Image (cartoon, grey):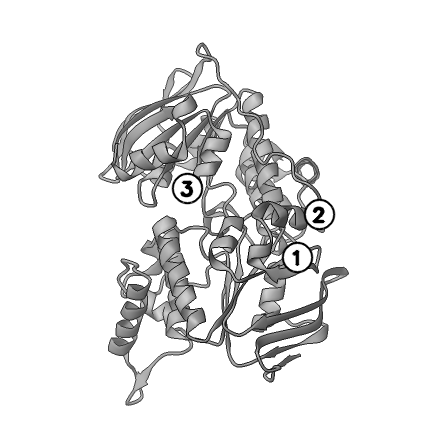
Amino acid sequence: MNETATASGYALEINGVEKSYGNVRVLNGIDFSLQKNRIAGLVGGNGAGKSTLAKCIAGYLDFEKGSIRCDASIVMIPQEFMLIPEMKVYENLFLGSEIHKYGFADKKEMIRQASEALDKLEADIDPEARVENLGVAKRQMVELAKSIIFPSSVLIMDEPTTVLDRDETDVLFNLLKRYRDSGGSVIYITHRLYEHAELCDDICVMRDGDIVFYGAANTVTPHKVAQLMVGKNLDALFPEKIQTTSDAPVLLEIDDISSGEVIRNISFKLKKGEILGLTGLAGSGRTELAETICGIRAKTSGSIIIDGESHAIRSMYDAHKAGLSYLSEDRQGTALLLDDSVEKNTVLSSLSQYSVHGIINFIKCETAAGQYVSDFNIATRGIDSPVRTLSGGNQQKVAIAKELNTGPRIFIFDEPTRGVDVGARSEIYNVIHTLASEDMACILISSDLEEITGNCSRALVMRGGELAGELEGKLLKEDEIMYLATGIK
């Protein structure tokens, strides 16, 4: 049960909390105490129980045994966006807690407070803009603004920086430190282990529903934390780079492609068996370029040439027919149907393979989904389980399986490891490298520069909707990428 009284000096006390989903135990009698005026990092692999524990603390989930005591109020910013796309920003921020004056909604005051909160986050967002017109990073800023408008004694943040760039992350960290120094306490969940060293006072590591370490953040290295998360020593995170030969055939050629003013005059070539990096700062046009290539965004000029043949690609259907697959950066918004099963999501883009005269062969669908679950080590109770019940890393594997099942020759991965733990990251990298070794041409889009330099031998850097430059071999370094991305070079 949730109670309000805690021992002196603690903002939150958890004793013996147990939680199960059906016959699967996900929290094994958790004991945890959060001191006042502290930021505690909560880490663990996908399925370790982090988000479940956070939702129990916040009152989103019931639990079978144990108790949770809080000094005062708790606010949680979940990993999944809790926004209504058709509503305006300020309407989402005050949904269920509207401000009234003389019996009527005080629109002016709500807009004023929304604007003030967004200004503190240094977010250039119109409070009267509709959420559906905002990109993923700006939607995250709207979620974060809730914690400013409705302050609490305990703030829980679940993967808040997965869609933020470095500058936006710095603003958030400064805000959290001020919040702590003014009397608040924070539980901070992230897979980016370096963030804990930068932000957190303490760190709590979970594995398989248990807490396996809880102590001061400065007493444990990120590498040690990663070992604690998986319960074993980690091999190298990145597979050995694939070196494409100079005479390897070109599989994809992008010739002077544009999409209005968003993407302007981009040209490049992608060879068979290559993993080509595509990076740049937030808003540089990385995702927009991928969407233009795949027909999600309208192309206003230029050519898309696959294996020497020009293609008119105006939709993902056209892209799949041409042998091109795209893993969206927004797996929960556009890549997956969260309430449908693993099986349905896996075959969603390739149903024509499993039907004759409009009649679907469900046995073949089950076989295909089961094979991907086995090959990709997807942790699920069964192929009939809703994707929503899977951890972030396993959801991402299902999204990859869905696109891979269309039989592509070219695969564009957009932020494939966003919001997944170090173990799942390694598995996803191995999938990408395996595909490339089998002569598939891959584009890896990422804001994580280590991910680019660790996986790619060549990378394109974008800035302001244009190609700022190309780096290869020994010149492919994080500082060189930033020089191009910021316009220094």
> Which residue is pictured at 45% across the width and 70% down the height?
180
Q: Classify mark 2: helix, strand or loop.
A: loop
- Mark 2 and mark 3: Cα distance apart in space: 28 Å
**In the picture, residue 462 is in which quadrant?**
top left
- Mark 1 and mark 3: Cα distance apart in space: 27 Å
Q: Quadrant of the N terminus?
A: bottom right
Residue sitting nearer the eye, 304 or 183: 183
Q: Pinpoint residue 324: horizontal percent, then vertical percent.
A: 46, 29
Specify whether 291 is left or right of 124.
right
Specify whether 269 is left or right of 154.
left
Q: Which residue is mark 3?
A: 447
Q: Amino acid at mark 2?
A: Gly
Which is in the foreground here, disc 2 or disc 3?
A: 2
- Mark 2 and mark 1: Cα distance apart in space: 10 Å
Looking at this view, name the residue that lies furthest to the front: 219
Mark 1, Cα crowd under 10 Å, few <14 / some 14-19 / many 20+, is many
Q: Amino acid at mark 3?
A: Ser
**In the picture, residue 354 is in which quadrant?**
top right
Q: Is residue 162 visible?
A: yes
Looking at this view, name the residue that lies furthest to the right: 23
The dot on residue 231 is: 2
Q: Which residue is mark 1?
A: 206
Q: Is residue 463 above or below residue 437?
A: below
Q: Is residue 421 visible?
A: no
Q: Pinpoint residue 14: horizontal percent, then vertical percent.
A: 65, 73
Question: Upstream in the sequence, badge 2 or badge 1?
Answer: 1
